[in-house]
Amino acid sequence: MDVQKRIKISDLLKEAPIGKEVTVMGWVRTFRNNQFISMNDGSTINNLQAVVDFQQMPEETLRKITTGSCLSVTGVVVESLGKGQSIEVKVKDLEIFGEADPEKFPLQPKKHSLEFLREIAHLRVRTSTFGAIYRIRHSMIYAVHSFFHERGFYNIHTPIITGSDAEGAGEMFRVTTLDPANPPMDENGFVDFREDFFEKETNLTVSGQLEVETACLALSDVYTFGPTFRAENSNTSRHLAEFWMIEPEVAFCDLEGLMDLAEDFVKYLTRYALEHCAGDLEFLENRLLEEDKSKPQQERSTMTLTERLRFVSENEFERLSYTDAIEILRNSKPNKKKKFQYLIEGWGSDLQSEHERYLVEKHFQKPVILFNYPKNIKAFYMRQNEDGKTVAAMDVLFPGIGEIIGGSQREERLDVLQERIAEMNIPEKDLWWYLELRKFGTAPHSGFGLGFERLIQFVCGMGNIRDVIPFPRTPGNAEF
């Protein structure tokens, strides 16, 4: 085995060095007629065909070349006469690194449901679909960092274990070393967290926002990109208990500037995907077209996957206030004919995915940014507008998915922030350090959050968020 000599299949297919001897290593997708090995090493959506001379190959070796087995093959690159590939490798030497018993290996060459593949998440990346998703996910991670780096932002690592609840939602995973069966109690009969590891109640973070604001008010342009956790008992295709969040925070930036940044950001990401992930997107697009054929006409996608990405990257986003959006929705056909699951009665309603998608896909037919939401349905840290009823918040809405970004100008006025914290019954002592940012050199600043898996869902056209993260964490599921 000469690993140094190995050439990746992606490079080999690009270079197509006819007549050259090469060594490739990878996993067998199929083996036909005791002759044609279809191999993949994960570097590309495309398989490489390696052709063995079965008359020269020992019978015992041929028996071990099965779907899922891992091989090294050395041979000469030749033009392929078969369909589906321009070159192939004529095998001289073959070594089997790892066998895969065809009676037991669950990924045989046939169609497997996404539900079944979730049960074998440790193996599903060996399928073409999940190989494509993982490669696109990597490209999008790279694109996120490139976007911010090119604009002079600094990446900040915020804590995963925290004592604050950024959203005020209370649905958090507790972190403790106390004995759950027999925790120490205080004089009032409550669990005494002073005896815990951190000597206070701590949780897994729901957002890095509050902590990244500390860096924003010193370094100006910053962002965090890390894991976040929500203990919502929600078994839907849109929710995970563990997911990744991208949260930029920008000093000297108002709501208008934040909307500009959000629009630039998602356009950059969709353009990057179109430019750098063409092969994987083409595969996923064809997969969706096949899937659509089995659906009733009204449930089929109106746009192909790449059309949706261009829809975002090429259209100016429509910007409208929450108040105007409510009027449009209240007077819309689906609302008047009671087709919406959640009817819009009037101002103050919390918008659902069906309303957001109606605005994007039917009414405006372009991505939409909604702004100036009622303060009663938004978080404590959002800047209150002069009308006393709304906050300077904004959401970016995409086709097929609804809200993909949520953000706001932050409340930089100490007295207004304290008033809002009291209104929402949040203990001031838990946020003493956050309030000090407003006492010492406060400044206008804004930020947003983008759920990374929602972005990958959109880019890959996947219907279920559990299929765009390697090991989904959902209620009752932490198997791997």
Image (cartoon, rainbow, N blue to C red):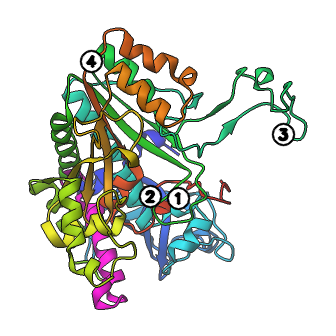
State which mark lies toward you, 2 or 4: 4
CA gap, disc 2 and disc 4: 38 Å
Query: Is residue 78 among what the camera can see?
Result: no
Q: Dot 4, how many residues are within 10 Å of its Cα: few (below 14), some (14-19), or many (20+)?
A: some
Residue placed under numbered mark 2 in the picture: 468
Looking at the image, is mark 2 or mark 4 earlier in the sequence? 4
CA gap, disc 2 and disc 1: 28 Å
Q: Is residue 290 magenta?
A: yes
State which mark lies toward you, 4 or 3: 4
Looking at the image, is mark 1 or mark 3 earlier in the sequence? 1
Magenta residue span: 272-299
Residue placed under numbered mark 3 in the picture: 180
Looking at the image, is mark 1 or mark 4 earlier in the sequence? 1
Q: Nearer the viewer, residue 131 or 319?
A: 319
Q: Is residue 289 magenta?
A: yes
Looking at the image, is mark 2 or mark 1 earlier in the sequence? 1
- Circle 3 sits in a helix, a strand or a loop, which is it? loop
Q: Looking at the picture, which amino acid does disc 3 mark?
A: Pro
State which mark lies toward you, 2 or 1: 2
